[in-house]
Image (tube, rainbow, N blue to C red):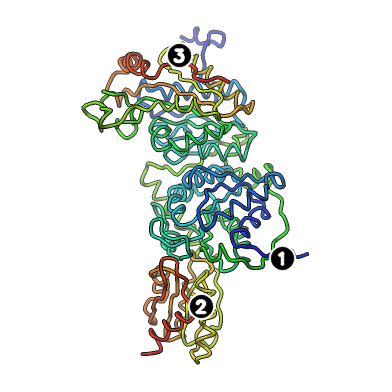
Amino acid sequence: MKEVKLMKGNEAIAHAAIRCGTDGYFGYPITPQSEIMETLMAEQPWNSTGMVVLQAESEIASINMVYGGAGCGKRVMTSSSSPGVSLMQEGLTYMAGAELPCVVVNVVRGGPGLGTIQPAQSDYFQTVKGGGHGDYKLITLAPSSVQEMADFVEDAFDLAFKYRNPVMILSDGAIGQMMEKVELKPQKPRMTEEELIEKYGDWATTGKTKNRKRNIITSVELASEEMEQFNNKLQAKYKKVEENEVRYETFMCDDAEYLIVAYGSSARICQKSIQLARAKGIKVGLLRPITLFPFPSKPILELAQRVKGVLSVEMSAGQMVEDVRLAINGAVKVEHFGRLGGIIPSPGEVVTALESNFIGE
Amino acid sequence: MKEIIKEENIVYKKSVVLTDKDTHYCPGCTHGVVHRIIAELIEEMGIQETTIGIAPVGCSVFAYDYIDIDWQEAAHGRAPALATAVKRLMPEKNVFSYQGDGDLAAIGTAETIHACNRGENIVMIFINNGIYGMTGGQMAPTTLEGMKASTCPMGREANHDGHPLKITELIAQLPGTCYVTRQAAHTPAAVRKTKKAIKKAFENQMQNKGTSFVEVVSTCNSGWKMTPAKANDWMVENMFPFYPLGDMKDE
């Protein structure tokens, strides 16, 4: 039987984490995502599934706890918001370098610096372009509903282990805080130690048994030639991710003369904008990237070749628009519209931006 | 020689838990001795299959090359955070961190103090040679007043560089720790005492007693620019008065 509940996006993350068999959550409170840890602590999953939940002394410690747990082959996660995720960049580059799977939820707020606690999408660059030092990528899922907040936790773990790479769920304060109905999946058991060793025993630090060499989780390699080889291996992995894992959704694109590209909260607003625009006779459609890395470049280009203009709508000064432009490569005019610092654009503003950039010409 | 090298004449053997790889440590360095102690203990206690080590950043970054167990290599200072998660997620395993002074007492102070304060059921081994060895002999938080380092070439001056940090004394005050001790490894007797201390630390973990913390006051011949013998003498004369050996806590 379906279990449908009304809850916040942050709460949905917590419940989904327990239900998909997560082994450990290590975090540090920060608005607007503290309900994730609060919900986990209230649910006490250590009594029901054995899941470890621990409040660390900092975001730096929590991401490094995630590193330790992931190194054991465990399904471990953390969550934070923008300034906290900045502190986690060290751990993330180490995890990418050690090829460790994990899930990190970023419920983005306005910045830079301490900024505001209101929703923004201004961490796009930090998330999809690496964030920490070195050539690495985070697989990035961008939910636009409370349902997707729940669903993407398990998806993120699956991707993280499939590619042995950190996966970011890039949400924002609006989706984290808003309440919607969500259908929760039934409880899955956590992996037993035997199952874990069977699946990940070739690399995870589960204790060196007599029948194998010691497993070492590390990212240090002093010889440049070998480091280059490792980097090439990483890049080949990212290419495979780009070939296989692109996810996106389209809305009213069949007859569209204009295209909006928007993700997360912005995409929700743009659906309304499209209805408003169409009522005025402007045929516009939406492409919503669900994965931000890998970016849906090909479908965007295909649609762009059939329209007169493309508008990237994002709650930032224009970050994703760079990837949209790269995808389209000059085939058609691309413009950006966004509000900054925690302001959510109104559907009407988006229509005005569409008109002023394209229709008025 | 062949007549002498007989099984019955052998009084000491390399532990099977030590790999055959030559270490990268400088002659006279304490890391090799402490590695040997750990390997011997893992062998004697029969815990090779259940022990997971957390290696630091610094000279002993490659500790995993020498001790034949599963290892995780931590970012600078973060070993206690890794150890926390490994132990909490695999409570039946024996988990220890191995860290130097820069790692444990400078960049990782927060992780060190909070892991100890939570009473994480782990072993922390702290090699304190009062200097940054790997990066070429810069000042450490534990560098003594008046002691020269490349970033305090005239000698550490408390008014300018701050005071040397007795992190072990700080940690001993935390209720999460059950055993806090300071040892050395410059003489056979000291090596035996350090081995006993580390053994007790592992036993405490098996008894779920909380955090055991073993500091080993050490030398860095290269960083100190002394011969190994001179470095040992200098340590006895200068380090021991400020970092006195012995148990600070044993509960």
Instruction: Label 3, secondary structure: give it.
Output: helix
Q: Is residue A17 left or right of residue A29?
A: right
Is A137 rendered above or below residue B153? Answer: below
Which part of the image, by quadrant, shows the C terminus of chain A?
Answer: bottom left
Where's residue A106, x and y in %? 51, 58
Q: Is residue A320 left or right of residue A181?
A: left
- The reply to whether dot 2 and dot 3 touch (C-beta < 8 Å) is no
Q: Amino acid at mark 1?
A: Val
- Residue at coordinates 52% horizontally, 58% vertically from top-left? A32
- Residue at coordinates 40% horizontally, 46% vertically from top-left? A226
Q: Mark 1 sits on what residue?
A: A4
Where's residue A167, x and y in %? 53, 56
Is A144 rendered above or below residue A87? Answer: below
- Residue at coordinates 61% horizontally, 43% vertically from top-left? A201
- The reply to whether dot 3 and dot 1 touch (C-beta < 8 Å) is no
Q: Residues within 10 Å of mark 3 (few under 14, many from 20)?
A: some
> What is the total number of numbered labels drawn onto the structure image?
3
Instruction: Label 2, secondary structure: give it.
Output: helix
Work out how far the residue at label 2 is from the one at label 3, CA to CA, in angstroms.
72 Å
Q: Mark 2 sits on what residue?
A: A270
Where's residue B174, x and y in %? 51, 29
Work out how far the residue at label 2 is from the one at label 1, CA to CA, in angstroms.
27 Å
Is A294 rendered above or below residue A350? Answer: above
Q: Residues within 10 Å of mark 1 (few under 14, many from 20)?
A: few
Q: Mark 3 sits on what residue?
A: B190
Nearer-the-camera pick, B154 or B169: B169
- Kindly report which numbered mark, 2 or 3, lies closer to the viewer in this rendering: 2
